[in-house]
């Protein structure tokens, strides 16, 4: 039992940015609805922020605002601390100190959890508080609760999907409008889908953070973030998208993990996705995450992947779940991961070079027949076969873009072959390659 029964839960929020402000607004605007559903009054009583906040659409009548997170942490009347500052410096201090004080914690901080999961979850395990982090993956999609609770009886075989709205918006713009990468990125920034520094989004790092969290939930283990192969979308060109479409594919940034007899495989990279797959139809800043269990089969969750309101909805959902448990005698929390911390071990991922994929290769040449012959001969020397082929009409410089599909081959063998192919006189520049999503 975490504490005596009470009907009012006090919440302290650290960070009044877009998500923090959205969370306070939701809890204030929907207070009567939440109380009707739960029998609990949830009040945000303190908030810490270093940014200007007076312009926010928040009722400050009963909300004390400070510039020190210590004022929130040290308030004995606060039951739940919400960390929405981000980063892994001050945010880590907030979470660990809150657990040390026996308070419950809610966060959207995917990077902190992915990089310091063992320390964070150990602290949660040793605390009398509870831990919610639904908002760390998928924005408004309740994917963490689905895996932890809804699929708790299944052996999860795989997780895959589109987990970054910025990258998906850029690829959608390139696909639908023929936009160049840099122009699509600028549009995403103008619409507020991309940060001024979009590195985490376009280089796949944000997706990788989310994949690690989902793997730890699904596969009952801890993983080293640095072992996860991560590749972004900055090398994707309009020719890749056009040729992929001719083959019957769309290009998406895919995060995926598989639980096989060989071990656990996890990776993030652009991939060709069949137009028959529902993931191929996910447009704009939306996310879609597929979970496959040995009994439930294939499932797909879809929704807004980011933004103030969808993410605030996920944060509020955790606050409400914790509040329900705090107000019920004997209401013990479900472990934040699918299993208790003391039943989890660290597991190494299968190295990327030991994985297998089908590949899409694209190169430019003025003589497609000669280029195909040279590429085919070089690949044959490496015992790699060529499948279907497509050619785009010549561009301004008279060159044609040629694409070929490669049947399943090991990553190490494919990379060795690509190293030999790059720089051949018959080809202009290096060969572009994209793996094919299965």
Image (cartoon, rainbow, N blue to C red):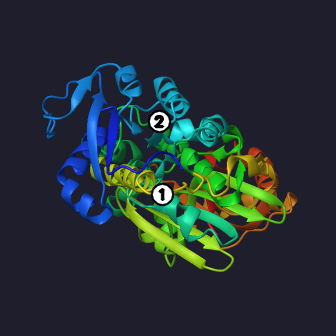
**Which residue is at 33% across, 35% downward?**
13
- Left or right side of 305 for 390: right
Please provide percent x and percent y for residue 172.
Answer: 38, 59
Give residue 199's mark. 2
Q: Is residue 373 left or right of residue 292?
A: right
Task: Please tell me which residue lies in front, 360 or 285.
Answer: 285
Position of residue 394 in the picture relative to residue 39 (left or right): right
> Image quadrant for the C terminus?
bottom right
Q: Is residue 53 left or right of residue 259?
A: left
For this rendering, which residue is in front, 230 or 412? 230
Where residue 21 appears, as percent x and y from the top left, is: 25, 39
Q: Residue 303 or 196: which is nearer the viewer? A: 303
Q: Residue at x 75, y 44 (%)?
A: 419
- In whole angstroms, how far apart are the C-alphas of marks 1 and 2? 23 Å
- SS at mark 2? helix
Q: Badge 2: few (under 14), some or many (20 or more) residues near its Cα, within 10 Å?
A: some
Dot 1 or dot 2, earlier in sequence: 2
- Is residue 31 something that shows in the picture? yes
Q: Determine which residue is flagged by label 1.
A: 239
């Amino acid at each position: 039992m975490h504490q005596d029964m009470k009907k009012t839960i006090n919440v302290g929020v650290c960070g009044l940015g877009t998500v923090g402000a959205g969370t306070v607004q939701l809890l204030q605007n929907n207070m009567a609805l939440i109380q009707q559903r739960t029998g609990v009054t949830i009040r945000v009583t303190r908030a810490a922020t270093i940014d200007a906040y007076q312009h926010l659409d928040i009722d400050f009548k009963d909300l004390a605002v400070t510039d020190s997170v210590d004022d929130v942490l040290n308030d004995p009347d606060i039951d739940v601390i919400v960390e929405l500052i981000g980063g892994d410096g001050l945010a880590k201090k907030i979470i660990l100190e809150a657990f040390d004080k026996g308070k419950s914690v809610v966060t959207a901080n995917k990077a902190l959890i992915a990089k310091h999961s063992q320390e964070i979850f150990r602290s949660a395990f040793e605390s009398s508080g509870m831990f919610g982090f639904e908002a760390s993956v998928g924005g408004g999609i309740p994917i963490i609760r689905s895996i932890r609770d809804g699929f708790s009886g299944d052996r999860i075989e795989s997780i895959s999907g589109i987990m970054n709205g910025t990258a998906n918006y850029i690829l959608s713009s390139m696909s639908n409008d023929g936009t160049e990468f840099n122009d699509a990125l600028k549009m995403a920034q103008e619409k507020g889908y991309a940060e001024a520094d979009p590195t985490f989004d376009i280089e796949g790092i944000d997706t990788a953070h989310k994949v690690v969290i989902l793997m730890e939930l699904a596969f009952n283990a801890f993983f080293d973030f640095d072992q996860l192969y991560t590749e972004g979308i900055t090398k994707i060109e309009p020719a890749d998208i056009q040729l992929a479409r001719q083959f019957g594919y769309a290009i998406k940034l895919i995060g995926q993990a598989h639980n096989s007899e060989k071990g656990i495989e996890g990776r993030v990279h652009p991939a060709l996705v069949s137009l028959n797959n529902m993931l191929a139809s996910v447009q704009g800043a939306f996310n879609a995450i597929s979970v496959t269990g040995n009994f439930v089969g294939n499932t797909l969750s879809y929704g807004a992947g980011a933004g103030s309101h969808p993410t605030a909805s996920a944060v509020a959902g955790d606050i409400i779940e914790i509040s329900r448990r705090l107000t019920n005698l004997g209401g013990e929390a479900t472990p934040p991961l699918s299993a208790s911390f003391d039943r989890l071990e660290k597991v190494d991922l299968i190295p990327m070079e030991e994985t297998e994929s089908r590949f899409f290769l694209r190169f430019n040449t003025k003589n497609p027949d000669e280029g195909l012959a040279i590429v085919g001969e070089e690949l044959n020397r490496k015992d790699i076969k060529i499948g279907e082929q497509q050619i785009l009409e010549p561009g301004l410089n008279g060159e044609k873009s040629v694409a070929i599909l490669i049947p399943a081959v090991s990553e190490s063998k494919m990379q060795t072959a690509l190293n030999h192919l790059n720089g051949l006189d018959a080809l202009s520049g290096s060969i572009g390659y994209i793996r094919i999503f299965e």
